[in-house]
Amino acid sequence: MKRLIALVFFLNFLNTTAQDSRSKMIARGAELELKTAIYKAPPGDALSHHTSGFAKIMCSAVFITGLKPDFAAENVGYFTSPYAERAKVGKPVIDYDKKTVSITLPNGVTRTAIYTGDQGCITLPEGRTSLYYKPIKVPRNLPNAATTPWPMGDVLPNTPIPSEIDKVKVEQAVNAAFETSEAQTAAFVVTYKGRIIGERYGEGITKDTPLESWSMGKSLSATILGILIRQGVYTLEQPAPIPQWQSKGDARAKIRIMDIMHMSSGLYCRAPQDPDFDPALGYPDHLYLYTDAGNSFEYAANLPQQWLPNTVGRYRNSDPVLTNYLNRLGIEKLKRNYHTFPQQALFDKIGVRTMIMETDPSGNFLTQGYEFASGRDWTRLGNLYLQDGVWNGERILPEGFTKFVSTLAEPWVADGRPIYGGLFWINGDAARPIPKDAYMMLGAGGQSVTIIPSHDLVVVRLGHYKGSKAGDIALNKAYSLLMEAIPEKKK
């Protein structure tokens, strides 16, 4: 009984602390608000937007990941298609010949997502039967993975793992990531100094299966921008050259690229994660940038300003979408093909074969959350960061870039949340049982790539969305065991 009373007291304490933190954030935001933004909710019907997301999720699950429709409808991707909203519309109709998924609303409107190949799945705008652009094939210039050593291929070494590693605890950590079955863990990969020391997959999943990754793609967007910085197209400190902001007197012209990457642009982009989010104000822009914006870059670039840049940190899709906009502008400035550039400039260099970056109907990458890749391919990307942006002796990311993305953003610290850097999450509040130097690509539904420099570790966990709560518990157990298994790097 005493333990139960103590637990209730502790939970009440946590709840009170969270409420106090939320109230302080709201008060600080209100104090700094410019009072000039007139908010207008996204146009259209909310259920139609949700259904657009549902059709896209189902299309990707079936035609990219290879899941069975009934399983996908029950377990995958609630983010742009909440579970409760799925019950309000018809059952997804899969056309395996045309590679489409269609879902009908009660008012008779049908939302259809189409599989395009290397640009993944895209929901058609209402009233249209085609996209605003023509998808293309993305060539992959890589050797045969079956005969090429890791990490450029999939052939693993047969020599013993380093003696300083507790192999038994590593195995226990891998198993812990899959406990319980409610966690729905699909892939778990651990590397030490770039070498795979632990790996396991869920039922029906292999090392080559592209899985839902969600907002881990924000860190991918940052990586592509880093490549453009390395190639001299941009600097972090410069004002972002968004064309829609260049009119005389537009205050948004002062927003720097680093402000956008810190998610502190100050743009008014309502998101469910906002501490003062009010559902009564309509469908949130944060989700509309996934489901029905048509041209996501144009929509994000025309959002009004709520705060001065670099003052308030908010998790809003406007900023990673604008990062992708900058990527497109920069790639086209180099006179390179927008849709093939990531494979040529990044993935071919580090052995990534399965990455699918999905777009909006206008062909703009939606890698604020719409991308799919295998556990091993996300591990490769994590190791690029562990190696300070260098791969096989070639510097891919500019010097100092990994430090930038893994350093706490001041506006977030000022809000009492030492958890965000440059489109990467940071364990600055020690919420996870890993060192504070750890930084992460995180995605809804329990997706994560965790880079732990002090232990030379990269840990990747991917899972089906419905298992996210149990999956988080399982991952923390795995983290704890890995910290016991892997020694801290000597300084």
Image (cartoon, rainbow, N blue to C red):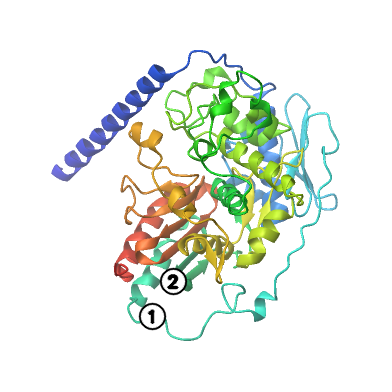
Q: Quadrant of the N terminus?
A: top left
In screen coordinates, is 2 left or right of 77?
left
Does dot 1 land on a helix, a strand or a loop?
loop
Type of amino acid under label 2 = Lys
Type of amino acid under label 1 = Pro
Q: Residue at x 60, y 66 (%)?
A: 350
Specify the quadrant of the image occupied by residue 433: bottom left
Name the foreground residue: 400 vs 441.
400
Q: Are marks 2 and 1 in contact (CB under 8 Å)?
A: yes
Q: How crowded is the residue under tag 2: few (<14 C-alpha within 10 Å), some, or many (20+)? A: some
Q: Is residue 284 visible?
A: no
Name the foreground residue: 191 vs 336.
336
In screen coordinates, is 267 left or right of 363?
left
Q: Is residue 148 above or below residue 30?
A: below
Specify the quadrant of the image occupied by residue 287: top right
Q: Is residue 245 above or below residue 111?
A: above
Q: How crowded is the residue under tag 1: few (<14 C-alpha within 10 Å), some, or many (20+)? A: few
Q: Residue at x 83, y 29 (%)?
A: 127
Rendering coords of residue 467 (x, y %): 49, 50
Q: Is residue 332 above or below residue 88?
A: below
Residue at the disc numbered 2: 193
Residue at the disc numbered 1: 162
Rendering coords of residue 343 (x, y %): 69, 59
Question: What is the C-alpha distance between the residues marked 2 and 1?
Answer: 10 Å
Rendering coords of residue 235 (x, y %): 56, 44
Specify the quadrant of the image occupied by residue 474: bottom left
Name the foreground residue: 55 vs 5.
55
Does dot 2 land on a helix, a strand or a loop?
loop
